[in-house]
């Protein structure tokens, strides 16, 4: 997901973005004088990588003709995630077709279908899908989210649909995509989550608007992978991380770093369209993260988002179990990085930050997000005691309360920053 058009956004960059509901403000802090380079690392470890992801982002720029962009085999709970630019003059559409290659019936339950608005603004596309993912979380649809009410769970479940694939048949899914015109130079992204009783072979295609999608699944040309190689089938659509140490707010600042391809490695897969060649999802795009951070200590502290790999624009949900506030034992907040006049944070600097709440030692923070398309990894979450924070100036920060409870090469020491997106 390398940028063609990053330059058009450069003149709009400032250090932070957004506004809190109710008109409150967050501070753009002086990280250097707040002790940034002396913060203690809190390494993570991967607890589990579960379920299958079919990633479709290569070729990212589709042209001079459409065809099959990505294809692979899924069974059980799985996700298809697409991210493509129409590099052709004519309007095109994205189409997803499932094939049952077996001699017996197969049942598929579709849990979620999320899509963005096609646009030339790449950050807007990545940011929108990131936000949609948290507004309609898969865990709520599956009934495994402890932070939503039974009524909300029922609402999400009611949106599911079940289809039957007859033996040796193909069926078009996510039919709303048929109506979406992807114009020249527009980026379009989305995902579909489903559970299949047995194996299905999925194809993601970009086709002219008038072409019959189901028929094209038999005749469309397979397009070659591009140099970024972001496609294929992977295990790890849901990743659970553990922070190996309890953060002690009495001991100063600390940080948790994710998607760095070290403690939090990029998932590995195969490209079934190209002789099962090995591929790597550099950035873990399409992966839903679930990370729990335990704290202790007597000092109040703030949490900050801090991009390391370059420009970033996306959403994060934080479910907090409070140790001191008995009237609000658990709260849920969703924070959006970027938007409005400021498309992103982190271009050509590692010292951008955005506050994501204030907390007390003893609080437990449960952080959920999916790496935003068009954005760059790795990123850090900074934990800074109030007494250490040195403020710069006030600017607005976008803050949401959901219904449900680029390429930079900045040297930051031992952080391995790759041109990921």
Image (spheres, rainbow, N blue to C red):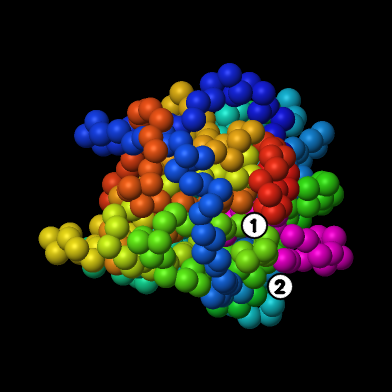
Disc 2 + disc 1, Cβ < 8 Å: no
* Numbered tag placed on residue 93 in the rendering: none
Question: What's the residue at 70%, 43% (across, down)?
Answer: 411
Element at label 1: loop
Of all residues, the one furthest to the right in this rendering is: 275
Of marks 2 and 1, the one in the foreground: 1
Task: Locate residue 151: give its quadrant.
Answer: bottom left
Q: Nearer the viewer, residue 107 or 26?
A: 26
Residue 128 falls within the magenta-colored stretch = no
User: Does residue 388 appear in the picture of this structure?
Assistant: yes
Dot 1 surroundings within 10 Å: few (below 14), some, or many (20 or more)?
many
Q: Nearer the viewer, residue 37 or 258?
A: 37
Q: Which residue carries the number 1 mark?
A: 260
Residue 271 falls within the magenta-colored stretch = yes
Magenta-colored span: 268-288
Judged left or right of residue 280, residue 143 is: left
Q: Which residue carries the number 2 mark?
A: 101
Q: Quadrant of the N terminus?
A: top right
x then y, percent, for residue 214: 66, 52
């Amino acid at each position: 997901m390398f940028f063609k058009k990053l330059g058009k956004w450069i003149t709009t960059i400032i250090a932070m973005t957004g506004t809190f509901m109710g008109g409150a403000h967050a501070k753009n802090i002086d990280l250097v004088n707040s002790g940034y380079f002396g913060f203690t690392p809190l390494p993570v470890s991967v607890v589990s990588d579960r379920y299958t992801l079919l990633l479709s982002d290569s070729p990212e720029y589709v042209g001079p003709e459409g065809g099959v962009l990505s294809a692979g085999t899924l069974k059980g709970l799985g996700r298809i995630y697409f991210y493509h630019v129409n590099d052709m003059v004519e309007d095109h559409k994205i189409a997803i077709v499932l094939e049952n290659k077996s001699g017996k019936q197969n049942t598929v339950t579709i849990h979620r279908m999320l899509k963005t608005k096609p646009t030339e603004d790449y950050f807007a596309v990545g940011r929108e899908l990131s936000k949609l993912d948290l507004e309609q979380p898969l865990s709520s649809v599956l009934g495994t989210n402890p932070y939503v009410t039974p009524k909300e769970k029922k609402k999400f479940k009611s949106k599911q649909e079940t289809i039957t694939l007859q033996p040796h048949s193909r069926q078009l899914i996510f039919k709303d995509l048929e109506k979406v015109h992807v114009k020249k130079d527009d980026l379009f992204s989305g995902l579909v989550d489903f559970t299949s009783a047995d194996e299905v072979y999925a194809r993601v295609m970009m086709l002219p608007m008038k072409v019959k999608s189901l028929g094209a699944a038999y005749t469309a040309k397979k397009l070659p992978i591009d140099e970024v190689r972001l496609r294929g089938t992977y295990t790890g659509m849901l990743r659970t991380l553990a922070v190996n140490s309890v953060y002690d707010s009495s001991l100063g600042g600390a940080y948790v770093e994710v998607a760095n391809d070290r403690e939090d490695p990029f998932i590995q897969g195969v490209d079934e369209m190209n002789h099962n060649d090995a591929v790597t999802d550099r950035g873990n795009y399409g992966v839903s993260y679930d990370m729990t951070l335990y704290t202790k200590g007597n000092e109040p502290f703030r949490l900050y988002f801090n991009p390391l790999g370059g420009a970033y624009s996306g959403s994060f949900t934080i479910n907090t179990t409070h140790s001191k506030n008995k009237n609000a034992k658990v709260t849920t907040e969703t924070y959006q990085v970027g938007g409005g006049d400021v498309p992103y944070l982190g271009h050509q600097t590692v010292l951008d930050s955005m506050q994501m709440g204030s907390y007390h030692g003893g609080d437990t923070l449960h952080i959920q997000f999916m790496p935003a398309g068009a954005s760059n990894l790795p990123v850090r979450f900074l934990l800074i005691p109030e007494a250490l924070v040195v403020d710069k100036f006030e600017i607005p920060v976008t803050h949401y309360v959901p219904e449900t409870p680029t390429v930079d090469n900045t040297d930051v020491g031992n952080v391995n920053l790759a041109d990921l997106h």
